[in-house]
Image (cartoon, coloured by chain):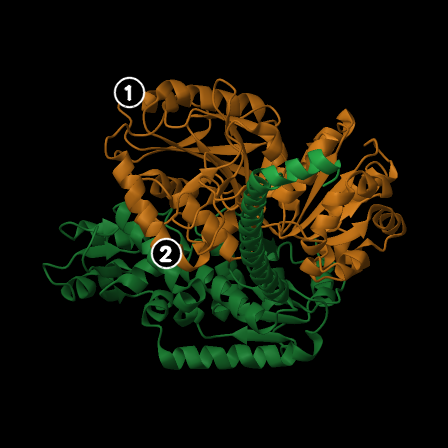
Chain colours: A orange, B green
């Protein structure tokens, strides 16, 4: 059933972008929704524009309440099961409503899309937060490596979808961060503290002008720094020892930051063709389904079949196509960052020195064994043998409840 | 739609939760939380005459199921589904005339609902029905939690519903004739915030009009906002019983409420075991999160040390190669090789 949707938008000038954002929302939202707009004292005619928007609840704050407080105010007018906090300079694409499908999973608290600049360049594919509070967006100039579904430490609230009861239970954005910066980072950290997942879905790409609706101020940097200090003071214990993304001493820090909420990491090395329904593909997809907090990275010499590409991105499977000569270096870069290295006989033979060198870094498993376990339904047991947490253990529920969660289907298996 | 009997005990929580009355919404919030905490395996389902079909501003996003049309089919389904029924609110509110006044329903519907909730006049209450007569407001601030209350009070200050800083007095009146008494308790320099409780809008408006520079909580203020303002006020002058109970957080009242909920939980405890339920899953998730943090920290430390060792190894190899280049073929060896053809 499609949940009732409440879209909350905060405006502060930038009338042209507001018009475009509302136009994109209207054109690309085929489900019923209510629109609530809080205007933070625009002086460029934005309020006149909003007056003409049919069925919108417009709240004229008359002054700049800041991003978080204005959103909190808008949410009080909402009735939907789901809230979409949408920036007035964010343009939703035609398939953006697929973000709501995530909320069939009760463990999901919030979802963010991938953000791109108006010229198409990648802006943010989820983000990590350093131990000094610095927010480091993933993926800038590095699209393929980061464009798959995964849990993220943080995602900008330019288009944040969140359950309304969860937003209420958290008390909304914290006004301590008004007027702006770090209120959304704080909210996602509070969400993680309640063990609710924050999911990044790159299959939906929202154009975000970033800053078009912000107050142009020479004090912006000072505000950002002040709120960063406030944020670090609040989350110091949680931030301690987090891996670096920018200025990382070693490359594995970036992967550690990206997969911070996916500690059970499995790397599959295969020399075979990656085509739908092959044993290798069945095993890989079954792994991705079965891991509770996992990341499956597939290292292959061949490109993935086009039919699988979108499916794998949706399942959170990372695919890396590498020249055989580069495999050893790649494995060394990931040393210590994966739990289980999986391969078939050919892969082990092809990369024997690297395979041998990694013995001390990872547990090893045979791809044929995993494929067999995936076929006969005993994969959960194999995962437990390797110290990995299967999804059913996370749910802690007996069979009939587990059945409600995604498992490989006839189509995907 | 009432489900078939479940393996989990289901508690029906009945009240007028489909109104904008502060007291009803606090009741729903507190009693649901109290029962869920004590009986994690139980499923608490809220019911009200019209349920969530009647839109209210103050209601949370949680589902409230309707008790109307209160016919035999519904009565039988409820009887089969609910292991315990907790009825909240004064009994007088469940009388047909009160229901007609509140919900504008026809008399026969109101009579059926009255019988469903209060039972036939001659019948004694069945053992699985419990009337909760104490208002649970005293527990409201504990249930919502200090962090959320602080955040909501800061929000109320930021949007100008209460003074931006400094102490304030929270006031409310149910009836116009109480205005004088309330006004008399205020000092001229008090910053005053009017906190309507629902159904008292006219009296509260009159109260606001009688004050020099009042702050007034608007209808959209949430339940948490209202509790935060009552909780954060330097002084509270209210006539609504639920607000008084909420603001006082009286220790004796809290003890009595806890005892009542403990007794209710004991009635169902034997049935409340079973599969893991939300609080246990939450505990499991907390444990897995802690494991993830440990794994992340250990792996990072291991990989950092490994990379440092590899760097040291590479440096040593380079040094060795340089040494070899410098010493592997000394001049005397070349001479020996030339003379002997070996070496």
Q: Position of residue A105 (x, y in %)?
A: 65, 48
Q: Secondary structure at mark 1?
A: loop
Q: Position of residue A330 (x, y in %)?
A: 65, 39
Q: Name the residue that disc number 2 marks.
A: A234
Disc 1 with disc 2 on a shared chain: yes
Question: Which chain's residue wears label 2?
Answer: A
Is residue A368 shown above or below B72? above
Q: Quadrant of residue B293?
A: bottom right
**First-in-chain label (1 vs 2):** 1
Q: Which mark is residue A44?
A: 1
- For the point 45% across and 57% down, the residue is A238
- For the point 81% across and 43% down, the residue is A348
- For the point 37% across and 27% down, the residue is A211
Q: Position of residue B58 (x, y in %)?
A: 43, 52
**Looking at this rendering, what residue extends furthest in the left direction?**
B188
* The C terminus of chain B, quarter of image: top right
Q: Quadrant of residue A258?
A: top right
Q: Which mark is residue A348?
A: none
Q: Position of residue B289 (x, y in %)?
A: 57, 59
Residue in front for this viewpoint, A297 or B63: A297
Are the residues at dot 1 and dot 2 in contact (C-beta closer than 8 Å)?
no
Residue in front for this viewpoint, B26 or B159: B159
């Amino acid at each position: 059933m499609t949940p009732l949707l409440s879209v909350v938008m905060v405006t502060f000038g930038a009338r042209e972008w507001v018009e475009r954002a509302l136009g994109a929302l209207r054109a690309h939202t085929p489900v019923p929704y209510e629109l609530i707009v809080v205007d933070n004292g625009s002086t460029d005619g934005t309020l006149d524009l909003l007056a003409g928007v049919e069925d919108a609840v417009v709240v004229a704050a008359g002054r700049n309440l800041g991003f978080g407080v204005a959103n909190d105010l808008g949410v009080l007018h909402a009735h939907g099961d789901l809230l979409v906090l949408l920036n007035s300079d964010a343009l939703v694409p035609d398939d953006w409503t697929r973000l709501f499908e995530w909320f069939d999973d009760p463990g999901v608290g919030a979802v963010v899309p991938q953000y791109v600049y108006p010229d198409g360049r990648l802006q943010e594919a989820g983000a990590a937060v350093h131990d000094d509070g610095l927010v480091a967006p993933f993926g800038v100039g590095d699209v393929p490596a980061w464009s798959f579904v995964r849990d993220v430490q943080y995602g900008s609230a330019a288009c944040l979808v969140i359950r309304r009861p969860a937003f209420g239970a958290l008390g909304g954005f914290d006004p301590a961060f008004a007027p702006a910066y770090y209120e959304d980072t704080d909210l996602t950290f509070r969400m993680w503290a309640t063990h609710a997942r924050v999911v990044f879905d790159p299959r939906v790409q929202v154009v975000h002008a970033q800053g078009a609706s912000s107050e142009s101020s020479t004090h912006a940097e000072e505000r950002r720094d002040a709120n960063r200090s406030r944020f670090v003071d609040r989350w110091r214990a949680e931030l301690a020892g987090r891996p670096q993304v920018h200025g990382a001493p070693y490359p594995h820090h970036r992967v550690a930051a990206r997969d911070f909420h996916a500690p059970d990491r499995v790397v599959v090395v295969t020399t075979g063709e990656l085509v739908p329904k092959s044993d290798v593909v069945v095993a890989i997809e079954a792994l991705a389904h079965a891991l509770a907090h996992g990341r499956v990275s597939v290292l292959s010499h061949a490109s993935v079949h086009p039919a699988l590409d979108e499916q794998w991105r949706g399942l959170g499977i990372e695919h890396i196509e590498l020249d055989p000569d580069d495999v050893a270096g790649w494995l060394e870069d990931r040393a210590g960052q994966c739990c289980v290295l999986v391969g078939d006989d050919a892969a082990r033979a092809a990369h024997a020195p690297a395979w041998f060198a990694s013995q001390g870094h990872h547990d090893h498993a045979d791809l044929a064994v995993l494929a067999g376990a995936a076929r006969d339904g005993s994969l959960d047991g194999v995962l437990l043998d390797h110290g990995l947490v299967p999804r059913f253990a996370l749910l802690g529920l007996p069979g009939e409840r587990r059945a409600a969660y995604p498992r490989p289907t006839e189509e995907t298996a | 739609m009432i489900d078939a009997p479940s393996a989990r005990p289901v508690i029906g929580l009945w009240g007028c939760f489909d109104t904008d009355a502060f007291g009803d919404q606090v009741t729903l919030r507190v009693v649901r939380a109290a029962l869920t905490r004590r009986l994690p395996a139980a499923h608490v389902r809220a019911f009200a005459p019209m349920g969530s079909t009647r839109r209210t501003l103050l209601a949370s996003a949680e589902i409230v199921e309707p008790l109307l049309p209160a016919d035999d089919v519904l009565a039988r389904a409820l009887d089969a589904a609910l292991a315990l029924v907790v009825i909240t609110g004064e009994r007088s509110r469940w009388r047909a005339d009160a229901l007609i006044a509140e919900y504008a329903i026809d008399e026969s519907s109101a009579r059926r609902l009255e019988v469903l909730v209060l039972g036939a006049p001659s019948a004694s209450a069945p053992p699985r029905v419990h009337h909760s007569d104490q208002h649970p407001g005293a527990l409201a601030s504990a249930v919502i939690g200090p962090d959320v209350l602080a955040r909501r009070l800061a929000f109320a200050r930021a949007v100008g519903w209460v003074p931006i800083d400094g102490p304030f007095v929270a006031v409310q009146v149910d009836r116009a004739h109480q205005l004088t008494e309330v006004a008399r308790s205020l000092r001229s320099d008090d910053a005053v915030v009017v906190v309507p409780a629902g159904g008292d809008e006219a009296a509260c408006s009159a109260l606001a009009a009688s004050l020099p520079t009042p702050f007034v909580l608007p209808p959209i203020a949430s339940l948490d906002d209202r509790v935060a303002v009552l909780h954060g006020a330097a002084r509270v002058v209210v006539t609504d019983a639920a607000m008084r109970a909420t603001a006082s957080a009286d220790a004796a009242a809290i003890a009595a409420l806890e005892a009542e909920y403990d007794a209710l939980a004991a009635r169902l405890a034997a049935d409340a075991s079973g599969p893991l339920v939300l609080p246990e899953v939450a505990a499991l998730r907390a444990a897995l999160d802690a494991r993830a943090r440990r794994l992340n920290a250990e792996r990072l430390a291991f990989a950092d040390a490994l990379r440092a060792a590899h760097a040291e190894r590479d440096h040593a190899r380079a040094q060795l190669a340089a040494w070899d280049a410098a010493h592997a073929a000394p001049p005397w060896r070349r001479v020996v090789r030339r003379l002997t053809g070996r070496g």
